[in-house]
Amino acid sequence: MELTKDEESALKGEQGEILEMAYRILVATGEATDAEKLIPIEWAHLSGVNYNTIGNAGEEFLSSISKNARVKVKTTLNPMGFDIDNVKNYDLDKNFISKQLSIRNSYETMGVIPSFSCIPYEIFDIPKDGTQVAFAESNAAIHTNSFDNLKTNKESAFSALASAIVGKSPYSSLRKEDSPNITIRMKVDNPNELTYGMLGFFAGKVGDTSVNISGLGEMDKRQTKAMCGGMGTSGTCAKFNFGEGESDCEKIDFDEKEMQTVHDELNTAEKGDIITLGSPQLGLDEISDLTAKLKGRSFQKRCMVFMPRTVKEQSTKIGYIAELERAGCEILADCCTCLSPLISKDSVDAVTTNSIKGAFYLKNSNEVDVNLKPLLQIVEDETR
Amino acid sequence: MKILVSGKAEGIVLKSKYPINFLGTVDKKTGIISDENHDLYQKSIKDTILVFPSGVGSSVGAYTIYSIKSNDTAPLAMVCTKADLTVATGCALANIPVIIISDKEFSSIKNGQKITLDTESNLLILQK
């Protein structure tokens, strides 16, 4: 990889230890992905926030670098482990809370916007077409490449952090032109968001860096988010290209049989003890739609609803939150179904959700069983 | 030879034919491999030149590499045949030299051999 004189000097440590480390990460990532150079980025979105995933090593690392490190470009942040407003209602140990708050403090000290959201593409303005960004959250990287016309690779927590500090990323893979060699043909009729989640999960398994996808029809926001979340969960693939692709592309059908295989892998229970909605977190459109669906109805068991804080604030003003709480929803800002410490196998055997991404992590990380249903059916079965 | 993280190191080879999942199978306090299905089971990677195909598993494993370096239980350098982002970023965080070599070079390196690595002069010297 070619570096400018200034970049070489930073890599040698002539511009301080933090830049030396950040450049070391970018160069290692760039060499590993055959990048030719570093290019400027305008926005970084960081993962590695939830104490559940980064642990003591992550907490200590962030605390140590936050003394000197400052981000150079607009930088936003993935969800953390809980909502400070109601964490006392959950049985979470004090150590978790204090370590999580230390992580939050370190990021804020570095100048990161404390958005605690996995849907930055829905709550921040999107820069102009073709803008290079560095997104570490997989569903966000996929959404932003596929639906928002921005360019990013599926960054790691560390390459995104280094990019935030330096304001550059290695020029490789999806940042350049890409031509997928696989086309996935959607062959399932009358798809709902669960179908699209399974389609994404399937695509992530067979694709490498990006895939072509055809036969989608019109999709709403819930469905596009489900598809991106599903794909981010199962592999390294980070972009959908819409259409049949070149004639020499390998064609793979996603039919009822393939869908059943994904369903059997992730659906492990007939019913759940609790319900979770929001993985990825719900945006304002989905909250509005959920409120309408719950009119005059109430959940008969616990239903946790996850959203970014900004969406919670907007929804409160409009009156959605009061209506959702009336219907029995537990409202949680700043956190997400995915990797939540608030769902423990000690008290919950199985969770009902409409999210493939949520299902994967509930099963593999929280080690609880999962009952998959589309939202319409959840409302029908679980409310009165 | 491709350099992911540059630097110099001299030490004894600990070689594995299996990939290593740093998150969960390396004890951070001791540097000992705890995966009983791994050929390095119960061996310590501390102060070795760790030669293995590649890292696997969660990218959070990069924090494990940072931790073992902070705890003084890290290898002196890593030598792989395939570049993966967990090892690349973990070693970049911890400032541990990493190089990528060919399968042929990989098969010529033997366990217990002394190795000198200097990325600045592109040197990887095996001593008999």
Image: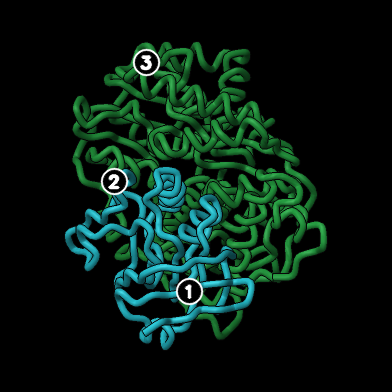
Chain colours: A green, B cyan
Please state which amino acid type lies under the numbered disc 1. Answer: Thr
Label 3: element kind? loop
Q: Is residue A126 left or right of residue A207?
A: right
Q: Nearer the viewer, mark 1 or mark 3?
A: 1
User: Within 10 angstroms of label 1, few (less than 14), some, or many (20 or more) residues?
Assistant: some
- Which subunit holds the residue at mark 2? A
Inspect this view and state whether residue A337 appears: no
Location of mark 1 (residue): B116
Q: Nearer the viewer, mark 1 or mark 2?
A: 1
Q: Nearer the viewer, residue A355 or B40?
A: B40
The reply to whether dot 1 and dot 2 touch (C-beta < 8 Å) is no
Visible in this render: residue B78? yes
Upstream in the sequence, badge 2 or badge 3?
3
Please tell me the numbered disc located at residue A364: 2
Does B8 sit left or right of B44 as displayed? right
Examine the rendered structure and indicate whether residue A19 appears above or below residue A84.
below
Q: CA distance from mark 1 to mark 3?
A: 65 Å
Which amino acid, mark 2? Asn
Residue A282 in the image: state x and y as whole percent. 51, 32
Mark 3 belongs to which subunit? A
Residue A77 x, y percent position in the rendering: 59, 35
| Mark 1 and mark 2: Cα distance apart in space | 42 Å
Residue corresponding to mark 3 = A328
